[in-house]
Image (spheres, rainbow, N blue to C red):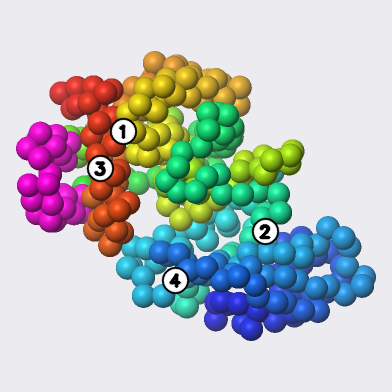
Amino acid sequence: MVATGSDDLSPEDLTRRLRASGALPTGRVIAVQSGERRNTLVSTIVSLRVEYSADTPPPAPTRMILKGSGSGLDPVLRQSGEHEVSFYREVAPLTPAGLLPRCYDAELSDAGIRLLLEDLSDTHMVVTPWPLPPSVEMCERIVDTWAAFHAFWWRHPRLGRDVGTFLDDQALAAIGVERHQRYARFAELLGDRLWPAARSLYTRLIEALDRLITPAYLYENCTVAHGDAHVWNLLYPRAGIDGSVRLMDWASWRLGRGVNDIAYMMAVHWYPERRARLEASLLERYHAGLCAGGVKGYSYEQLRYDYRRAVLGALMIPVWQQSLGIPPAVWWSHLNRLLAAVDDLDCASILS
């Protein structure tokens, strides 16, 4: 059974799991108490307080986050939770310290998922109240963190072997069929609210993606990509805390181009004025961070081109979100911001 609180997670069970993770070399858990419980679209999150026997060393975590599956999920959303378990099993153990919350246990069963994660609430915070964008300084630190993460995994020899999966032509073709079907339903739902110029762009895009999204392009400059890299899927150090940004919520991770995450952060969520002011400088900063992290043979010109392609591909995000039952309050603004970004960056010329 997947635990949903302290009633389902006994001290003996937690002791065993913490020992397996290396977080509890000696001593034992004597009590587990549940705190605040939050329900999100795809998960249930419970804070835990842990008490130990007297012989337990001080570094043992006294507070943790228990993340489990939500109830009544769309199968695609349920699968995303399973995907997050694979991230904490495959990717997190190899990732340099300081980029992710520590994971003490990642379990997958017929009942759903269960993650035991480091509770960083004393030292970190959600960067801003949604949908307010972060300050320039915050954005710079966030982009630096993405560059460090993407650079570490850039063309890593374990990618596609024991970390993630490379999709072949057949798998991409199946995704393409689903893409056509979801867009048809999306366009029918919106009716005249999807204006003629937008419909024309989508028609060209849907047809072009079948030939543009190939294994050769996806994996030429491959890294681990988040897939849902808005700024509320990370924790930012509190004022006065000398800490690093921590990247979290990895239910949509994949192998692909890292710049897609930067497009998700900016083009999907920022209105034209902010993009015009910050987009170029942050892309330059991201590229400098990749180079500092050891990435070679990837020019800034290639990054700019890949960013424009990423913005084009991101037009499918509101389509998928609507099809999964995510409220229009989320995806309608994404749609309009992305269409503005496509115009500003002349992305449609790529389709030619």
Name the residue tied to disc 2. 119
Q: Which one is earlier in the sequence, the residue at label 3 or at label 1? A: 1
Q: Which one is earlier in the sequence, the residue at label 1 or at label 2? A: 2
Residue 185 located within the stretch drawn in magenta: yes
Label 3: few (<14), some (14–19) or many (≥20) C-alpha neighbours in 10 Å: many
Q: Is residue 89 visible?
A: yes
Side of 199 where 274 appears, left or right? right
Q: Mark 4 and mark 1 in contact? Answer it, CB < 8 Å.
A: no
Q: Which mark is residue 335?
A: 3
Q: Which mark is residue 70?
A: 4
The span from disc 4 to disc 1 (Cα, nearest Å) is: 31 Å
The span from disc 4 to disc 3 (Cα, nearest Å) is: 27 Å
Residue 166: image quadrant is top left
The span from disc 1 to disc 2 (Cα, nearest Å) is: 34 Å
The amino acid marked with disc number 3 is Leu
The span from disc 2 to disc 3 (Cα, nearest Å) is: 34 Å
Residue at horizontal 41%, vertical 22%? 277
Q: Which residues are magenta?
A: 177-206
Q: Which one is earlier in the sequence, the residue at label 2 or at label 3? A: 2
Label 4: which secondary element: loop
